[in-house]
Image: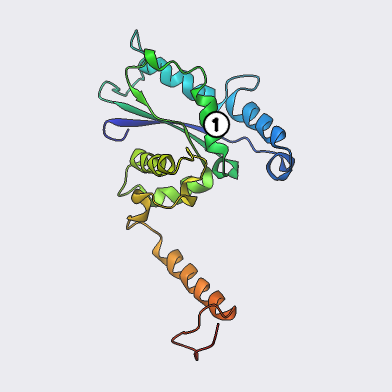
C-alpha cells in the first residue's frame, strides 16, 4: 500500500535455460517466458496478477482482501519479480506487459491499472535502498514516464533507464559503491590514456 496506490506483486522462482537466455532463437525465449511467467499448465505470474486485479477492481461485486481496505486505492501497479535475472533483461518487461494487456477488460474496472512492470530479485535488492525515502509505486511510475517519453514502452530495465527522477535525485544512492566505481573509472581512463590530466600524475597526451 502506497498512499492511494497499491502494488500487486508476484514473486517467481522459476529459472530459464541458458539456450533460451543466451542462444539465438527468440522463439525459444518467448516460449519459456509464456510457459513460466504467463500461462503454463496453470496460470503463472502475469495471468495471476491480471485475474487478481480484475477480481478486486471490478465494478460489480468486487472481491475483498482480508485485512486491507482497497476502497481508497485509486491506482494499482502490477509487478512481477523474478528470481532469474531475465526479469531485468532488455525487452522482457515490454513483452510481458503485452501479454498482461491481452484480454484485460478495462471497462469493468473502477480503478486505474497501470502497465505491468517486471524486475529481477537482484534489482529488487538494489531498489530497497531507495524505499526509505520514496514510494515503490512512485519509482515505477517515474520509470514508465521516462520510457513512454522515449517511445520504448518499458523495453529498458529499471536501473538501465536514465532520467528516472525518483532514482536520480535520491539521497539513497549507495555512496560507497558510487565512489568506488568512480575511482575505478578514473583509473581505467588514466591507464587507457583517455584522461590527459590527473592530480596524481603528469599530464599525458590523449
In the image: residue 177, left or right of residue 165: right
Which residue is at 32% across, 42% downward? 135
Q: Nearer the viewer, residue 109 or 81?
A: 109
- For the N terminus, give its image quadrant: top left
Residue at the extreme bottom of the image, as rendered: 202
- From the top left corner, tell me how far across and down residue 171 is, in percent: 32, 58
For residue 47, side relative to residue 34 (left or right): left
Residue drawn at x 68%, y 29% is 31
Quarter of the image where one finds residue 23: top right
Q: How is the image coloured?
A: rainbow
Q: Secondary structure at mark 1?
A: helix
Please state if 79 lies on the left or on the right of 60 as rendered: right
User: Tag count in the figure?
Assistant: 1
- Residue under numbered circle 1: 96
Which residue: 48% across, 74% down? 183
Q: Position of residue 20 (x, y in %)?
A: 71, 39
Location of residue 87 by image quarter: top right
> For the view shown, which residue lies furthest in the top direction?
60
Relative height, residue 176 to residue 130 (above, below): below
Q: Is residue 39 above or below residue 122?
A: above
Q: Is residue 163 left or right of residue 45?
A: left
Residue 136 horizontal/vertical position (percent): 36, 41
Q: Quadrant of residue 84?
A: top right
State which quarter of the image contains the C terminus: bottom right
Q: Residue at x 49, y 68 (%)?
A: 181
Mark 1 neighbour class, 10 Å CA radius: few under 14, some 14 to 19, many 20 or more: many
Nearer to the camera, 202 or 11:
202
Amino acid at each position: 500500500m502506497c498512499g492511494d496506490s497499491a502494488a500487486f506483486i508476484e514473486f517467481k522462482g522459476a529459472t530459464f535455460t541458458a539456450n533460451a537466455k543466451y542462444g539465438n532463437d527468440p522463439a525459444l525465449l518467448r516460449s519459456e517466458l509464456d510457459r513460466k511467467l504467463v500461462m503454463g499448465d496453470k496460470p503463472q505470474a502475469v495471468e495471476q496478477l491480471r485475474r487478481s486485479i480484475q477480481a478486486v477492481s471490478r465494478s460489480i461485486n468486487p472481491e475483498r482482501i482480508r485485512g486491507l481496505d482497497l476502497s481508497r486505492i485509486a491506482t494499482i501497479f502490477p509487478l512481477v519479480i523474478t528470481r532469474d535475472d531475465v526479469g531485468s533483461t532488455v525487452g522482457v518487461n515490454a513483452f510481458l506487459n503485452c501479454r498482461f494487456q491481452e484480454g484485460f477488460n478495462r471497462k469493468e474496472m473502477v480503478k486505474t491499472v497501470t502497465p505491468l512492470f517486471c524486475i529481477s530479485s537482484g534489482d529488487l535488492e538494489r531498489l530497497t535502498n531507495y524505499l526509505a525515502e520514496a514510494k515503490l509505486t512512485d519509482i515505477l511510475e517515474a520509470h514508465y514516464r521516462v520510457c513512454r517519453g522515449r517511445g520504448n514502452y518499458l523495453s529498458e530495465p529499471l536501473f538501465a533507464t536514465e532520467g528516472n527522477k525518483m532514482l536520480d535525485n535520491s539521497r539513497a544512492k549507495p555512496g560507497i559503491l558510487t565512489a568506488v566505481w568512480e575511482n575505478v573509472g578514473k583509473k581505467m581512463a588514466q591507464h587507457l590514456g583517455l584522461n590527459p590530466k590527473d592530480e596524481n600524475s603528469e599530464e599525458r597526451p590523449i
